[in-house]
C-alpha cells in the first residue's frame, strides 16, 4: 500500500510521510517486482545518437546500466541525508537480497557497479566536465573489468582497440548516460514529492552498543557468510592501477584475501585487548566453524589467517621496511598452496614466468586493497562498540 502511495505522491502541501527504510526499498521494488521506472529505461532511445548493442551483450548491458542507476539513487540519498544514510540504504538492500537467493546475480552486479562507480568518482573528482568523463570512464571500467565481459582484460595494451570493443564501449556509454539521466530525474522527483523521515540520529547508547566479547568476535564470521564489507571489498578496483586477474586461480584470490582481512581483525583484538584474547577469538571461530556444515572454505580462510599472522610477525622481526606484507603473503600462497599452478616452485625460479608475474601482481594489489578495507571497517566497528570482557 505504501508503495502505491509513494508512486502516486504529488508535491502538494500535504505530502505523505514515509520512513527512510520504506524509501530505501523503492528502487529494489521497482527493479525486482516490475522492472518499472527508471529501470525499464536502461536503453537509450535518442534517434540522433547512433549505437549498436551486440546481441550477446544485451542482458549484460542492461544489468550494468541498472547498477549505474542504483548508484544515482545512492548519490541522491547521500546528498540529502548524508553518507551514513547511504550505508543504511545499502544495508536495507543487502538484507532484502539475503531473502531473495534467486536475485544473487543482480546483487553481485549492483555491488560491482557501486564499487566501480565509487572508484571512478574518486578519480574524476575535481575535474571539469565530470558528467561526460564519469560516464565514459565507468563504461570502460565495467567493460574491461567485469568477469562476464568478453572484453575482460583489466590492462591497457599497445594493440589498437578492436572494432567490436569500440562498438560495445560506445553502446554502454550511451546507455549509461541515458539510464543515469532517467534515474536522476525519477528519483529526484520522488524525493521532492514525498516527505521522508530522515534516519534517526543514534543516541550515545546506540552509537556504542554493548556486546560481550564472545558475541562481538562473531562479527567477521557473519560478514564473511553474507559476503558483506569488508569481505565484499577483497578485489582491487582502481581504474588508474589496472591489473590482470588470472583465470582459474583467480577464483581462489577472494579466500586468500579474506584470510588477510580476518588477520586484521585478530591484530586489532590484540592491540586493544591483548594477545590472549586474540587467541581466544581464533578459538571461538574455530569451534564455531567446526559445527557448521559446508564451512570448508571458511575453515581454510581461518588456517590461512595464521599464515598471514606469521608473515606479519616475520616482517616485524626483520625490521626491513622494503619487505611488503602483500608481496610476501602472495608469494607464499602462489608457490605453496595446493591449488596454485606454481605450487612447489621457488619464487626466484619463476621470475621469467609471465603467468606467475601476472598472478603475483594481481594478488598483491588485491591483498593491499583488501587489508586497507578491513582496517577501515573493523577499526570503525571497534570505535562504535563497547566490548564487555568480563
Image: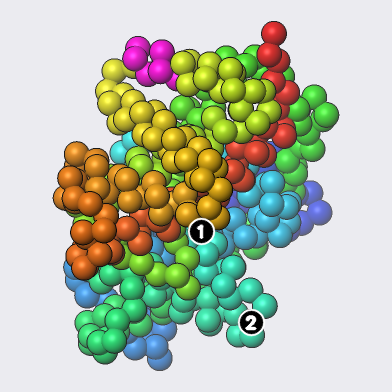
In the image, 77: left or right of 56?
right
Nearer the observer, 376 or 133? 376
Instruction: Answer above or below: position of 61 versus 312.
Output: below
Residue 112 appears in the figure: no
Q: Is residue 148 magenta?
A: no
The outermost residue toward the front is 318
Give the residue displayed 48% in from the left and 21% down from the top.
Answer: 282
Residue 241, by quadrant, is bottom left
For the C terminus, give its image quadrant: top right
Give the residue displayed 79% in from the left and 49% down from the top.
Answer: 14
The secondary structure type at the circle numbered 1 is: loop
Magenta stretch: helix, strand or loop mostly? helix
**On the image, numbered disc 2 is attached to which residue?**
127
**On the image, numbered disc 1 is attached to which residue?**
322
Instruction: Answer above or below: position of 331 versus 227.
Output: below
Display colour scheme: rainbow
Magenta residue span: 285-291
Give the residue displayed 19% in from the left and 42% down from the top.
Answer: 339
Return the x and y of residue 21 as percentages of the image width and height: 63, 39
Instruction: Answer above or below: position of 288 versus 141.
Output: above
In front of the other: label 1 or label 2? 1
Among the two numbered marks 1 and 2 on one chain, the one whose residue lies closer to the N terminus: 2
Amino acid at each position: 500500500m505504501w508503495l502505491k502511495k509513494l508512486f502516486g505522491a504529488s508535491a502538494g502541501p500535504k505530502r505523505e510521510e514515509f520512513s527512510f527504510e520504506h524509501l530505501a526499498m523503492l528502487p529494489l521494488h521497482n527493479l525486482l517486482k516490475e522492472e518499472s521506472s527508471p529501470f525499464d529505461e536502461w536503453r537509450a532511445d535518442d534517434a540522433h545518437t547512433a549505437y549498436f548493442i551486440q546481441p550477446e551483450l544485451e542482458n549484460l548491458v542492461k544489468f550494468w546500466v541498472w547498477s549505474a542507476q542504483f548508484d544515482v539513487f545512492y548519490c541522491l540519498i547521500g546528498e540529502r541525508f548524508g553518507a551514513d544514510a547511504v550505508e543504511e540504504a545499502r544495508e536495507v538492500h543487502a538484507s532484502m537480497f539475503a531473502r531473495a537467493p534467486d536475485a544473487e546475480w543482480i546483487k553481485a552486479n549492483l555491488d560491482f557497479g557501486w564499487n566501480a562507480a565509487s572508484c571512478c568518482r574518486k578519480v574524476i573528482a575535481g575535474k571539469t566536465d565530470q558528467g561526460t568523463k564519469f560516464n565514459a570512464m565507468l563504461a570502460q571500467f565495467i567493460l574491461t573489468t567485469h568477469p562476464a565481459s568478453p572484453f575482460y582484460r583489466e590492462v591497457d595494451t599497445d594493440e589498437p582497440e578492436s572494432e567490436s570493443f569500440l562498438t560495445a564501449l560506445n553502446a554502454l556509454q550511451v546507455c549509461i548516460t541515458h539510464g543515469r539521466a532517467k534515474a536522476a530525474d525519477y528519483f529526484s522527483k520522488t524525493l521532492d514529492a514525498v516527505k521522508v523521515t530522515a534516519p534517526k540520529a543514534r543516541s550515545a547508547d546506540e552509537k556504542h552498543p554493548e556486546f560481550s566479547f564472545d558475541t562481538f568476535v562473531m562479527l567477521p564470521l557473519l560478514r564473511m557468510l553474507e559476503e558483506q564489507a569488508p569481505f565484499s571489498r577483497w578485489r582491487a578496483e582502481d581504474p588508474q592501477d589496472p591489473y590482470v586477474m588470472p583465470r582459474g586461480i583467480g577464483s581462489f584470490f577472494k579466500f586468500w584475501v579474506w584470510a588477510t582481512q580476518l588477520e586484521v581483525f585478530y591484530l586489532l583484538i590484540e592491540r586493544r585487548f591483548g594477545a590472549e584474547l586474540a587467541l581466544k577469538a581464533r578459538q571461538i571461530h574455530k569451534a564455531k566453524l567446526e559445527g557448521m556444515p559446508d564451512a570448508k572454505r571458511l575453515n581454510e580462510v581461518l588456517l590461512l589467517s595464521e599464515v598471514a599472522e606469521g608473515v606479519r610477525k616475520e616482517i616485524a622481526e626483520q625490521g626491513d621496511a622494503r619487505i611488503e606484507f602483500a608481496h610476501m603473503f602472495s608469494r607464499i600462497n602462489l608457490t605453496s598452496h595446493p591449488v596454485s599452478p606454481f605450487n612447489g616452485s621457488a619464487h626466484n625460479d619463476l621470475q621469467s614466468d609471465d603467468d606467475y608475474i601476472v598472478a603475483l601482481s594481481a594478488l598483491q594489489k588485491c591483498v593491499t586493497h583488501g587489508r586497507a578495507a578491513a582496517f577501515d571497517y573493523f577499526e570503525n566497528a571497534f570505535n562504535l562498540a563497547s566490548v564487555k570482557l568480563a
